[in-house]
Every structure is written in structure tokens, then in C-alpha cells.
Amino acid sequence: MSRFIIQLFLAWCCWSMWDQPAEASGTTQHEESGAGQMWARVIEDAHRLQLPTKFLKALPPGFIHVEFDDLRTYAAEYHPGDHRMVLDRSLSFNAAGRILKPLSKMTHKELEVFYHELFHAYLDYLTVIDAQSGEAGHRPHELVHFARGQQACRYGEVQITPIIQRKDETESRYLTQAESWEALNETWAVFIGWAVWNQLEVQHKTKRSMFQQPRQATRWIRRFKTAFEKGEFRGYYVPEDPDEGRLARKRYLAQQSQLALEEAVVLMRQVLGFQNTFIEQLMDSFGSIGTSPCSTVEGSAE
């Protein structure tokens, strides 16, 4: 009996050692190599799926610390303080919570969520290097410069929907610096995720890039116009005021404060790397819609 107990104990020890993640005391070079390989696979998978890779290539391997957890409220979350991306275990290989599963194995919705969080990481990275450039006396990054202008012009005072289900009932809010930056960040990330999901949807049958298929490009543009007219490109912010935070954990923007067309154009050019001819076709489809009071597209999109 005692021999059986000892054997059982040894078996449990071996299983425990196998099941535990690698120790943090591993070499830094080994960790960097693993992060580089993972990031290379992400870019390769995205390229194979005909998805945007421009901003992915600008992110250095290892900048994002990816973790997995059983998320109940959200499918994913990003923490800029420590550049940490927390994904639901369903986005890991075999749902084991160890490594990211191949993009080709993700559903269109999962890829939408993943790209949404990747954009948060990208804007986080740009603000980090922008702060370093400012200390060195260099000009700010073009996208960050544009974002700060939009933050002041469009997201300082916004319209919100106090009750999400009642989109026609809106209230005005003056946002703090942190609130307005989060509102912009989430609004832009909503568009990035939407753009990727709809690209996957229109490319689904042919498996070819929509930029090579005029009919698919037209379908994407038609979807964009419909979403724009319905006010679907709306972000949110978490109120800093404790009293308001007790009423609502998040405040969602109203249609009047959704993504501006000028912002979409900049994001398509600078982040997603969409072709200029495609963007011109999209803008032509809107005709004359007037100029935004804080429009800087011409100076920021090239």
C-alpha cells in the first residue's frame, strides 16, 4: 500500500511539473525569441488571410504581453500601463490558455476582437515613442499628432446615450483628458475591428483580397456607408467621477459623437494600409458632406 502511495505521489509530481508554465527565470533571449516567433506567425497568418499588416509590422515583437483568462464580461481587454493584452482562453490554442491559436482558426468575430485589441496596443506603442521623441526634441508621430487634435476638437465635449437601448435620448458631457482619450481610443478601435470583420465577410467566398475584386470592394464600401449612417462607430469611456461611475460603469457615445469620416480616412491610410484608389472610391460615394471644423485629413493622411 505504501509503495502505491509513493508511486502515486511521484506521478503527481511529474504531472505538476509538466503542467506548469515555464519559469520566469528563463533567459531573456529565450523569451524574446519566443515573442518574435509568435509575432512573426501573427503577421504571416494575417498576410495569408489578406488582412491588414501595416500597423502590425510597426509593432516591435515583445511589446505586447499576451495573457489568457476566463473572461466573463468581455472577450478581451488591454492594459496600457504594462502593455498587457488579456484574451479569453477561447483565443488560445486548444483553449489551453498557453499560446495564441493561429489566426486561420479564429472566427471572423474573434479576429474582429483581436484586431480591436491590437489597435489599442499600437496606439499605446505610439504614445510611448511619442513621449520619448518629445523628450529628445523630435516631432510627434503623425497619427498621435492627429489623434491629439481630434481629442481636443471632437472628444472634449460629446453626446452620450445614458440608456444604451434608447439611442435617440442623448445628453452632453464635458470629458476630462483621460476620458476623452479613452473615448477616442475606443471609437477608433471599434472601427478597426469592424473594418477587419467586414473585410473577412466580403472576401469569404473567393478567399481573395477585396482590393483585387471590384465587386467586393463595392460591397465593403456599401457596408461602411450603412454603418456610418446608423451611427455604429461609437466608443465609450469610463467616468472618472465616482458618483457617475456608480450610476454607469461605462458611458457610450451617441451617434452625433461617432467616428468622423475624416478619422476613418486617416485610419484606413495610416493604420490599415488601404489603397488610395479604394479610399478615393469610398469618399466619392459620400459626395459632398461638408468639411469638419477640425478636419486635418489632407495634412495628416499622406
Image: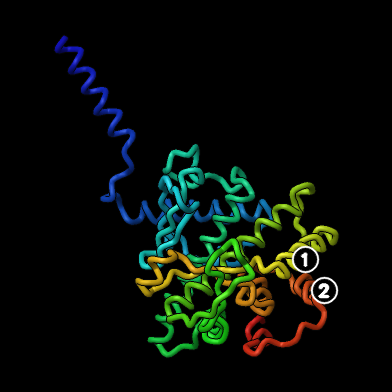
Residue 151 visible at all = no
Q: Residue at x 30, y 28 (%)?
A: 15
Front residue of this view, candidates 224 and 28: 224
Quarter of the picture containing the C terminus is: bottom right
Tell me whether circle 2 and circle 1 mark residues in contact (CB < 8 Å). Answer: yes
Q: Residues within 10 Å of mark 2 (few under 14, many from 20)?
A: few
Front residue of this view, candidates 173 and 215: 173
Front residue of this view, candidates 12 and 224: 224
Q: Residue placed farthest to the top in the image?
A: 1
- Could you tell whether 56 is left or right of 10 in the image? right
Q: How is the image coloured?
A: rainbow
Q: Residue at x 65, y 87 (%)?
A: 295
Judged from the image, the secondary structure of the residue bearing numbered disc 2 is helix
Whole-percent x and y of residue 274? 70, 68
Marks 2 and 1, Cα distance to the nearest angstrom?
Answer: 8 Å
Who comes first in sequence, dot 2 or dot 1? 1
**Badge 2 is on which residue?**
285
Which circle marks residue 221 in the picture?
1
Quadrant position of residue 32: bottom left
Is 247 located above or below residue 132 in the figure? above
Whole-percent x and y of residue 231? 67, 69
Q: Residue placed farthest to the right in the image?
A: 215
Quadrant position of residue 272: bottom right
